[in-house]
Image: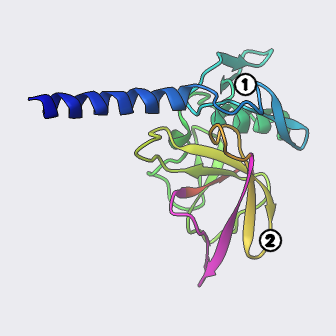
Amino acid sequence: MKITSLIIGLCILGLVGFWTFKKLNFNSSFAIGQAIDSLQGVYVYYNGGVDNVSGRNLTTDGYNLGLKYQCVEFVKRYYYEHLNHKMPDSYGHAIDFFDTELNDGQKSKKRNLTQYSNPSQTKPKVDDLVIFNATKFNKYGHVAIISHVTETEIEVVQQNPGSFGKSRETFSIDRQGSKWKITNERILGWLRKE
């Protein structure tokens, strides 16, 4: 009985610790809401723990950009400010940006963007929005913007990669026959304003 209680107590303690780590800022180098990077003049803000929420960000005309300083808020703000694009469905988590019912190269009516699967016949390019699948520890997925493309890699700019994550990350791309693949199994695909 004591061992069972100990195991239950340790599990509860572990879950509380994990929840706390995802909510709070353990990186004293940055303050929540601090600008830490930018892409085409659109700022990337520090969020602390990946589950931290600091309210909703709406534009002056009432368009929903998302929860401050989550990954979705950055990519929607980037598309709104830099590409003058509003998504018809302005709500949803990062994982919701990828529509599994669409074929490679079909238009997403919810986002008013063309969706490409990973791998795709179409090579990723700058300003594409990349969608990452959910994980056991992040059921919401993740999104980022492609900032640089070469023949062998892409660079993405992202908001809310975690307390100690970096705003820029590089992934290899590979030509497999007639298709391009971003060599990261979490990447479902990318969206593009045509």
Could you tell me which residue is drawn at 78 percent across and 38 percent down? 78
Tell whether 4 sits left or right of 109: left
Tell whether 101 sits left or right of 132: left
Q: Magenta span covers which residues?
A: 167-187
Coordinates of residue 118 in the picture (x, y in percent): 56, 64
Q: Residue furthest right?
A: 41
Q: Residue furthest bottom?
A: 177
Coordinates of residue 9 in the picture (x, y in percent): 26, 27
Q: Secondary structure at mark 2?
A: loop
Could you tell me which residue is drawn at 45 percent across and 51 percent down? 100
Q: Is residue 83 visible?
A: yes
Please determine whether, in this image, residue 131 is positioned above or below residue 162. below
Q: Residue furthest left?
A: 1
Kind of residue indicated by mark 2: Thr
The residue that label 1 is drawn on is: 32
- Whether 168 is among the magenta residues is yes
Coordinates of residue 25 in the picture (x, y in percent): 64, 28
The quarter of the picture where residue 76 lies is top right
Q: Secondary structure at mark 1?
A: loop
